[in-house]
Amino acid sequence: MSATATVDAGLATLAVKVVVVGDKQWYTNPLTGKFESTTQFTSYERIFDAQIGLGTLLTKLQHPSAPADGSANGTSCWKVTGTLAQADLAPIFGDAVKSDNRMYSVVIPGVIIDGDTANTVHTFYLSNFDQSVTIATPAPGE
């Protein structure tokens, strides 16, 4: 997984790059801009897990809304909202692109990992469907 996380730290908004390859993980330290090894992003890989990830959560969506016009990262899509039982995660909102029925974003508000608050919002943008993607591990000190 290769992603950029935008973190609202109150006085400043920071962009942090995250790279996960197998069991190894790195993020860019916002103070130095250099990659550092970490173990704090393991839970994010579960989003894509076929047994417990987004696909499984969507089958548990309660009270789904009718599709409405939406946009995910600049891509026109259908927006469907609904809720999940707290035990399944938290309320989840998904967008599927109108032309190809793919999910391009998911918004999960509330506490899902340590350090989150009730006001925390995780937004995931998905892309590069059916494409080969090469994710390089960062070099030390990069």
Image (tube, rainbow, N blue to C red):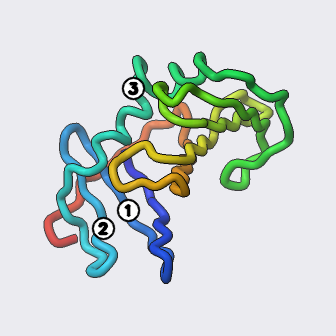
Secondary structure found at label 3: loop
* Residue drawn at x 84%, y 28% as measured from the top left: 66
Checking the image for residue 17, the label placed there is 1
Residue at (28% x, 71% y) in the render: 29
Query: Residue 12 at what x, y percent from top left?
Result: 49, 80
Looking at marks 2 and 1 on the same chain, the residue that comes earlier in the sequence is marked by 1
- What number is the disc on residue 137? none
Gap in Å between the C-alphas at discs 3 and 1?
Answer: 21 Å
Q: Are marks 2 and 1 in contact (CB under 8 Å)?
A: yes
First of labels 2, 3 by sequence position:
2
**Residue ID for mark 3:** 49
Quadrant in the picture for residue 46: top left
* Residue at x 76% of width, y 49% of height: 71
Left or right, 34 with reference to 96 = left
- Mark 2 sits on what residue? 28
Mark 1 surroundings: few (<14), some (14-19) or many (≥20) residues within 10 A? some
**How far is disc 2 from disc 1 in space, using C-alphas?**
5 Å
What kind of element bears circle 2?
strand
Which of the two discs, 3 and 1, labels the residue nearer the N terminus? 1
Circle 2 Cα neighbour tier, 10 Å, few/some/many (<14 / 14–19 / ≥20): some
Q: CA distance from mark 2 to mark 3?
A: 25 Å
Give, as a three-letter code, the residue at label 3.
Asp
Q: Amino acid at mark 2?
A: Thr
135 relative position to 119: left or right = left
Residue found 23% across the figure and 60% down from its top: 138
Report which quarter residue 79 is drawn in: top right
Q: On the rendered structure, is 30 left or right of 119?
A: left
- The residue nearer to you, when weighing 50 against 91, is 91
The image shows residue 68 at horizontal and vertical percentages of 85, 37
SS state under label 1: strand
Inspect the image, locate mark 1, and give the three-letter code of the amino acid beneath it. Lys
Q: Nearer the viewer, residue 121 or 127?
A: 121
